[in-house]
Image: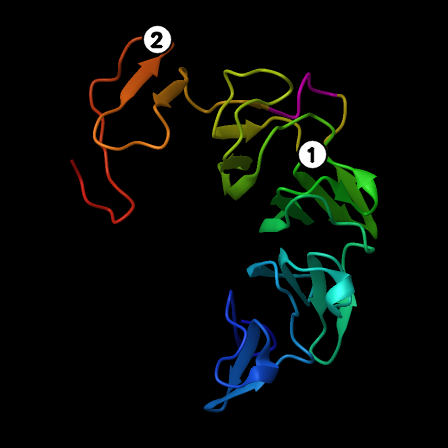
């Protein structure tokens, strides 16, 4: 919800008309376009958040396609602006936006943020983007605040070279500075788990680095339990 209007975004390019381009807004019973929309052949819009009275729209799209910015733009109700200073790029886009401690965090699979070398995470505050400098080898797909800390999950297999930190981790240094050993380091569990083979067909193995938990729930992508 932004300025009393409902915004809908995703991977669509022509609903209900071609000029809506991956994002539309609803007010008084009518769907309307959002300026020139988001133009991309890569993916679409992955997340939106309101930060300091401005709508931020993240995803996988490029300035060269006719957008105001790369992978991150902001909308003030009438016009699009580049929200990442042209500098969010690399192999992938931005998957998740998060407002925490009066900052705007971006997580994804990008290699640069505001033209600074970055590892999948950055935050915006007082007109400046600050990047995560701890190596992380694959995408961050989701992020959430729990008990005043940020937790991230995704396809990563190592953080700071530590291969025991896989898929789910806690952000120990939300400032991305040197006050902690590694910024994205610590699993929230007291053990780590690995599952193989991947992909799975009919059988798989589960390895733990400590005592097996008392109970495990296994579900497929449809939410069906086994």
User: Which of the numbered marks, if any, corresponds to residue 210?
Assistant: 2
Image spot of residue 95 (x, y percent): 57, 50
Give the number of the mark in front: 1 or 2.
1
Q: Quadrant of residue 36?
A: bottom right
In-image side of 197 versus 94 (left or right): left
For mark 1, what is the residue? 119
Judging from the image, what secondary structure is the residue with disc 2 in? loop
- Residue 205 falls within the magenta-colored stretch: no
Looking at this view, is 207 or 177 the one in front? 207
Residue 191 drawn at (x, y percent): 40, 15
Q: Residue at x 81, y 47 (%)?
A: 114
Q: Which residue occupies the foreground of this view, 17 or 187?
A: 17
**Residue 43 visible, this angle:** yes
- What distance separates the C-alpha of mark 1 from that of mark 2? 29 Å
Name the residue at 20% across, 18% down: 214
Helix or strand or loop: what does disc 1 sit on? loop
**Segment colored magenta:** 179-184
Left or right, 109 with respect to 133, comes to left
Q: What is the residue that sits farthest to the left in this orientation?
A: 226
Residue positioned 57% across, 38% down in the render: 139
- Mark 2 and mark 1 in contact (Cβ < 8 Å)? no
Q: Position of residue 32 (x, y in %)?
A: 57, 86
Q: Is residue 181 magenta?
A: yes
Q: Is residue 133 above or below residue 41?
A: above
């Amino acid at each position: 919800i932004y300025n009393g209007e409902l915004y809908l975004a995703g991977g669509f390019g022509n609903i209900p008309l071609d000029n809506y381009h991956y994002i539309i807004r609803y007010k008084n019973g009518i769907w309307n376009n959002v300026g020139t929309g988001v133009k991309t052949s890569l993916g679409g819009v992955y997340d939106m958040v309101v930060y300091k009275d401005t709508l931020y729209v993240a995803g996988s799209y490029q300035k060269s396609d006719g957008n105001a910015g790369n992978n991150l733009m902001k909308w003030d109700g009438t016009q699009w602006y580049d929200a990442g200073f042209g500098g969010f790029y690399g192999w992938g886009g931005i998957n998740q936006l998060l407002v925490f401690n009066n900052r705007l965090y971006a997580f994804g699979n990008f290699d640069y943020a505001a033209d600074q070398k970055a590892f999948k995470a950055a935050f915006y505050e007082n007109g400046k983007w600050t990047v995560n400098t701890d190596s992380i080898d694959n995408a961050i797909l989701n992020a959430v605040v729990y008990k005043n800390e940020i937790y991230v999950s995704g396809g990563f297999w190592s953080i700071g070279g530590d291969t025991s930190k896989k898929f789910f981790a806690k952000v120990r240094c939300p400032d991305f500075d040197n006050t902690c050993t590694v910024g994205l380091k610590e699993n929230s569990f007291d053990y780590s788990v690995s599952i193989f083979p991947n992909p799975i067909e009919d059988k798989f193995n589960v390895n733990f680095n400590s005592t097996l938990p008392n109970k495990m729930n296994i579900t497929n992508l449809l939410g069906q339990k086994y």
